[in-house]
Amino acid sequence: MLDSLKDVIRKSSIHACLINTGGCNGCDIEIVALLSPRYDLEQYGIYFHNNPREADVILVTGPVAEQWKENLQRIYAKAPNPKIVVAIGACPLSGHVFNQEGSAIYPPLNEFIPVDASVPGCPPRPTEILGALLAVGPDAIAAKGRQKE
Amino acid sequence: MIVPIGPIHPALKEPLRLKLQTRGEKVIGAEIDYGYVHRGIERVMEGKTWQKAVYLSERVCGICSYIHTQTFTETFEKIAGEEAPLRAQFLRVIANELDRIQSHLLANSTYFNTIEHETLFMYMLSLREPVMDAIELLTGNRVHMAWNVVGGVRLDAKEVHLKSIMNILDNLESQYARYPQMFEHGPLLGLRSKDVGYMSKEDSIKARAVGPIARASSITEDLRTEKPVYKDHLDFNVIWRGEGDNFARNMNRFDEVTESIKIIKQAIENLPEGKVRKKVNIPAGYADNRNEAPRGEVAYMIETNGNLIKNISIRTPSIMNIDACARYMFKDVATVADAVATYASVDPCIACTERVTIIDEESGKVHEVNGLHNVKSINLK
Ligand code: SF4
């Protein structure tokens, strides 16, 4: 009873936090575009608070610049369980065009924190990000929550 | 007391740490920490051909990605002593102004978000989406357009697409006028914005502020007036205001959108026939080139040996504007919330910022802000 109640609550109110680890902010503005009335992220019960301490979903963009090497784990630890990490864009997957000799980045992201889903693209379209969030968000969070107990 | 804000903070789109010095609720100074998005783009570009580097220049910044490729390719054209065909130059103008519109709408939406006026925030974002569609129609992409090449643009625009862009702009224009009015006459919005974060003309010159931020403080410079294609073929006004506060900065952006719509319409109507790309032989040499990005002046300095880039330096507008904000606008801000709003009104773009040298005027010291190796906060009085 309590479990299923928790499931329902977890599914219907998801708080997201965006971390730009050194990307060009192209991905970030596509995520901002998700808030616009055309895509309207909030109708799915996903809210942007940008506060890791209350985040269920952590969206990560960018190819992990030097300052984020340690900070990423710290921020990941701050988020309460159950949590989901979605890597947005080509940057966290491979470092993208920046991953060449002489650059100061340390991709891929999953060497630092566990990644649950990736959305490739530079930047991915808002609909793709939305699709990924909905595919992975509600159910996976509920499932992860059950695992813990 | 010192109030740290960031690097991850609800009001910031991008990572940056602001340390606000406060006395009571009043903000008396600020320190800024950069270095969270340093990637080393300039270093990566060295030793590459322009065909490879143009993608990197686009990814300096996502919001104003277009102007970076334009300035980059124009610099090479300048080294070769050539100009793109006139049709290509007109198409560049159209793309540039579309990009400016979406950037300004995004900047204003961020500001309204920080002063917690959600209605206008949503209005701005919903106005922006059709503009993104127009950009996609013209270039094939929403954010990174990959449209400029040395010697012109990659694709010609079709008549149908230009028509639909005209339609989109007509729609935008017919709805647009009420939003600046809402902002101008809304009493609460006025209270939150007028006389907050004031910067005088002298201060903005001292801080080398550029773009709409400087133009909101009575500076009438706009690099577009010096570009041949704007000067000879298009008719537009430079928007500037005298108040120098948050309200003026946002109104300035609002009014520039109207001008941009005007420019695009003229450009589409007078679009000359002809080719959109020509072959350019690049000799060894050096050139610098400046352009008016949505946030102000962006400059590229490139040295090439005819094939590979030997040296490149990029100067983006945000660094001066953020500096102006920390140094002058934060001086007399009543509350921390207003300080965050002031910061948002500067339209900071961190991804651009991480490569520049700042010279501290009082001590004459040079702070290198070339990313992590030298991340230093700028100390302000
Ligand atoms: S994937 Fe592309 S758009 Fe996204 S942050 Fe990286 S370079 Fe920018």
Image: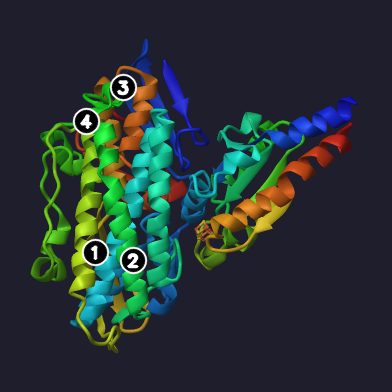
Answer with mark 1 or mark 2, whichever residue precedes in sequence. 2
Q: In which quadrant will I find the C terminus of chain B?
A: top left
Q: Amino acid at mark 3?
A: Leu
Identify the residue under disc 1. Answer: B264
Identify the residue under disc 3. Answer: B188
Q: Chain of mark 1?
A: B
Q: Label 1, label 2: how many angstroms apart (C-alpha)?
A: 9 Å
Q: Nearer the viewer, mark 4 or mark 2?
A: 2
Mark 1 element type = helix
Q: Percent position (x, y) of residue A126? A: 55, 55
Residue neighbourhood size for the residue with mark 2, other residues' Cα within 10 Å, grouped as few (<14), some (14–19), many (≥20): many
Answer with mark 1 or mark 3, whichever residue precedes in sequence. 3
Quarter of the rendering containing residue B359: top left
Answer with mark 4 or mark 2, whichever residue precedes in sequence. 2
* Marker disc for residue B207: none
- At 67% from the left and 53% from the top, the residue drawn is A132
Q: Percent position (x, y) of residue B195? A: 21, 24
- At 24% from the left and 64% from the top, the residue drawn is B264
Residue neighbourhood size for the residue with mark 1, other residues' Cα within 10 Å, grouped as few (<14), some (14–19), many (≥20): many
Disc 1 C-beta below 8 A from ligand 1: no
Disc 4 C-beta below 8 A from ligand 1: no
For the residues labelled 1 and 2, say whether their Cβ atoms are less than 8 Å apart. Answer: yes
Identify the residue under disc 2. Answer: B165
Give the answer, above or below, for where B42 lies relative to B47.
Answer: above
Mark 2 element type = helix
Q: Label 3, label 2: how many angstroms apart (C-alpha)?
A: 35 Å
